[in-house]
Structure formats: structure tokens, C-alpha cells
Amino acid sequence: MKFLSDILVASLLFFAFSLQGIDINRTNIEEISEQRTLSIIKPDATAKNITGSINARFEQAGLKIIAQKRICITQEQAGKFYAVHREKAFYDNICKYMSSGPIVVQVLQGINAVLKNREIMGATNPANAAIGTIRRDFGENIEHNAVHGSDSEENAAIEIAFFFSSLELID
Ligand code: CMP
């Protein structure tokens, strides 16, 4: 009898730990896939007054805009933001361009936000962007391509901190 009750207790303990394991795994997956990414609506798009149309694309795809501001930046500030491209031939032009008019900087939050935003934006060159993407529908050329989005979760954290304090991120 004692032997049977020991087996019963052991089975119950095993079952409880298994359930706990499943819960822990599920929580980890959710934590890993919920992300934030930096988005910039560029001067060509603010000039066309289409920031609302662009924001609707993010929201329809399930991304939440948890911070947003319309600002102007200097060429020097643009240079700091795009510092990773310092050696590229297009560096000076993109810095001049990003300081040529208002931009809207924003933080998007959602499941796999970095990759999802890149899918919604489309390829850097609007000519190569898939049908239905922001850059295909609103971009003019590789420089005037309507939007910028972070390319990794690591860079997203750096880019978000460039424009926003943690107090401005309203989840
Ligand atoms: P963005 O995602 O903002 O990152 C850097 C920007 O440089 C890019 O979008 C383009 O608008 C701009 N750019 C201009 N020329 C090029 C190029 N030849 N290759 C990549 N990006 C370019």
C-alpha cells in the first residue's frame, strides 16, 4: 500500500512540474517575441501629408505606436543617427536629406515588431519593394523612400534611445 501511495505522489509531482515547465516555456516565447522598434517617417512623406496613412498601415498590422513626435533635426544630428553608414557614398546626401524638412519619429511595439515593420516598409529601394508595402506605395527613390525602420532588436534599442527617454514610451 505504501509503495502504491509513493508512486501516486511521485506521479502527481512529475505532472505538476511538467505543467510548470510548459508555462515557463510559453512565457519565454511571449517575452522574446514582444519587441519595440524605431520608425521614422521621412521628409518626403511629411511633405505629402501622409503620416496618418502610414500610421494606419502599422496599426492594421497589429503594431502599437507607443511614442511619436514631429521634429526637425540638424545635419549634424542626422550624421550621428546614421553614423553606421559614415563610410558609405550616400552618407552626406542622406544626412542633408533627413535635415531638409520635418520628420516623425516613433516607437512601434508588437510581436516581432522589428521584422514586421521591415515587411510593412518593403525593400529600401521603392522600385524593388513588394506591392502593398509603404515604400512601394509612397516612396519615390532609394533616398526619398518614405520611412526608416530599425534593422535589428539591438539597433532598435540604440535608435529609440537616440530620440526618446524611457518616460516618453507609453505602453
Ligand atoms: P534607411 O532605412 O533610412 O537607412 C539608410 C538610408 O540611406 C536608406 O534608408 C536610404 O534612404 C538611404 N540610401 C541612399 N542611397 C542608398 C543606397 N545606395 N543603399 C542603401 N541606402 C541608401
Image: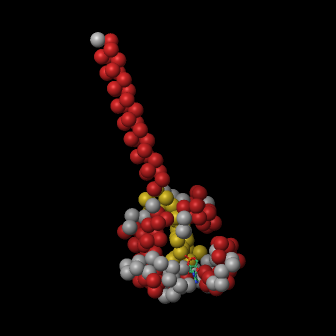
Please indicate, yes or no, whether residue 89 appears anywhere in the rendered image: yes
Depth check: give the residue in front, 141 or 59: 141
Q: Is residue 59 left or right of residue 147?
A: left
Determine the residue located farthest toward the right in the rendered image.
76
Color encoding of the figure: secondary structure
Q: Nearer the viewer, residue 114 or 171?
A: 114
Q: Is residue 2 left or right of residue 124?
A: left
Residue 70 horizontal/vertical position (percent) = 55, 74
Foreground residue, 11 or 122?
11
| Residue at (55, 82) in percent of width and height | 43
Give how far across and how far down residue 20 sits, in percent. 40, 36
Q: Which corner quadrant of the image does residue 16 belong to?
A: top left
- For the view shown, which residue lies furthest in the front direction? 3
Residue 74 shows in the view: no
- Indicate the position of residue 78 as horizontal and vertical percent values: 65, 76
Write the residue at 52% across / 71% down: 149
Q: Identify the image quadrant of residue 99.
A: bottom right
**Residue 40 to residue 44: above or below:** above
The answer to which of 67 and 160 lies nearer the viewer is 160
Residue placed at 33% from the left, 14% from the top? 3
Label tally: 0
On the rendering, which quadrant does ligand 1 occupy?
A: bottom right
State which quarter of the image contains the N terminus. top left
Q: Position of residue 48 (x, y in %)?
A: 48, 85
The residue depicted at 59 percent of the width and 83 percent of the height is 101
Q: Which residue is farthest top?
A: 1
